[in-house]
Image (tube, helix red, strand yellow):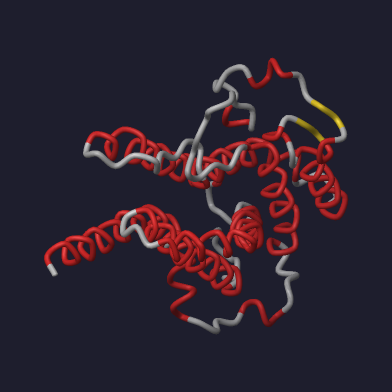
Amino acid sequence: MKEGFKRIYFLDELRGFALLAMVVHHALYDVGFVLGYQWGYAAFDFLCLFQPLFWGIFIITSGICSRLSRNTLRRGAIVFGGGLAVTLATAVIMPLIGITGAEIYFGILSCLGACMIITGLLMPLIEKLNPIAGMLGSALVFLVFYSVSAGSLLFGLIKLPTALYSTNILMPLGFYKQGFFSADYFPLLPWFFMFLFGAFLGSYAKAGAFPKGLYKQRSRALCAIGKNSLWVYLLHQPALYAVMYIISFFQLIF
């Protein structure tokens, strides 16, 4: 954070909660994927109903923090690099050792890193705009572009040209051809505008205008997870795979 700003512990706790929920969600998928228990897939599918809530928490809090960061561009480059590392591990290294079906192209880290970089470049303009108008505009554009990956705008009211979906080159924006798969996928359209919503909301955090209760720490554990979100994200899946494969090994023995 920039010097002179009081830490908003509630943001750390929110992000920590969203990350913890994500780890549990991924663990349930791994129960099905690695151990072969169908109840893992069933529980995973049920929790998918709540996924957008956790996505929203994570992306909006990251947008808010972009207004408090010492160097949003540097932070974005680091996070984007973490996303590239995830792609390398899941799409190159894991298939070499026989683990397929978990490839990640432009997942949450890649998306957040790109959003931070774009927002950092646009920050002089963002700071000149009215935050209320910015939040309303960002929310509106987010809704307009929400169905881009399904080939349309405004939830199917406007169909987009099929030529946009003839290649995977535009995959980071939400356009990809049939057969594309990513176990974790967050294209810039529409998610950048959710991040931007958080960036405009962050103007109030920058001004110290959030409710006083948000500056108080309530859970050290959630704060610790939230403060170290990049490392938690990078390491949780290898740790889960290790645990699942150890369990699988002992199942074969006993």
**Residue 18 in which image quadrant:** bottom right
Seen from the viewer's position, the closer of residues 249 and 58 is: 249
- 198 left or right of 169 in image: right
**Residue 104 in which image quadrant:** top left
The x and y percentages for residue 45 are: 55, 59
Observer able to see residue 74:
no
The x and y percentages for residue 116 are: 58, 43
- 146 left or right of 102 in image: right
The x and y percentages for residue 249 are: 17, 61
- 231 left or right of 203 in image: left
Counting labels gives 0
- 210 left or right of 100 in image: right
Identify the residue at horizontal 70%, vertical 80% (top origin): 212
Seen from the viewer's position, the closer of residues 189 and 223 is: 189
Identify the residue at horizontal 75%, vertical 46% (top origin): 127
Identify the residue at horizontal 60%, vertical 68% (top origin): 11
Give the vertical position of 122 relative to 69 (above or below): above
The x and y percentages for residue 112 are: 55, 45
Give the vertical position of 250 relative to 86 (above or below): below
Give the vertical position of 1 relative to 112 (above or below): below
Seen from the viewer's position, the closer of residues 26 and 73 is: 26
Observer able to see residue 146:
yes
**Residue 85 in which image quadrant:** top left
Seen from the viewer's position, the closer of residues 20 and 36 is: 36
Identify the residue at horizontal 67%, vertical 34% (top origin): 149
Q: Quadrant of the C terminus?
A: bottom left
